[in-house]
Image (cartoon, rainbow, N blue to C red):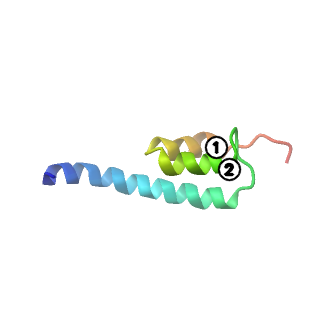
Amino acid sequence: MNKEIVLLVAPLVVLELILKLICLRDWSQRERMNGLSRTAWLLIFLFVNLFGPIAYLVYGRKYHGND
């Protein structure tokens, strides 16, 4: 692998790991999610690269229920 490629990809990998840790912490503290079940959101933000955590943070955290 070229050194230039590693330098370009490394910040994206770090960003993705930070987002996943933020999502995992938030997911573990919430009882209800928007749209999907807790397990579905967990799988989405763990296995859908970069867009999964963003989707969770934008859409999954909002809950408009009768709490």
Residue drawn at the location 53% of the way across and 48% of the way down: 45
Specify whether 9 is left or right of 57.
Answer: left
Specify whether 23 is left or right of 10.
Answer: right
Question: Circle 1: is it few (<14), some (14-19), or many (20+) Cα within 10 Å?
Answer: many
Residue to which mark 1 is pinned: 60
Residue to which mark 2 is pinned: 38
- The location of residue 60, given as percent across then percent down, is 64, 43
Image depth: mark 2 or mark 1 in front = 2
- The location of residue 49, given as percent across then percent down, is 43, 45
Q: Quadrant of residue 64?
A: top right
Q: Are marks 2 and 1 in contact (CB under 8 Å)?
A: no
Q: Amino acid at mark 2?
A: Arg
Specify whether 65 is left or right of 16.
Answer: right
Residue drawn at the location 51% of the way across and 47% of the way down: 53
Q: Quadrant of residue 63?
A: top right
Specify whether 31 is left or right of 45.
Answer: right
* Disc with the residue nearer the chain's start (2 vs 1): 2
- The location of residue 59, given as percent across then percent down, is 62, 39
Question: Circle 2: is it few (<14), some (14-19), or many (20+) Cα within 10 Å?
Answer: some
Q: Amino acid at mark 1?
A: Gly
Residue drawn at the location 14% of the way across and 54% of the way down: 3
- The location of residue 52, given as percent across then percent down, is 51, 43
Question: Dot 2 lies on which element?
Answer: helix
Q: How many marks?
A: 2
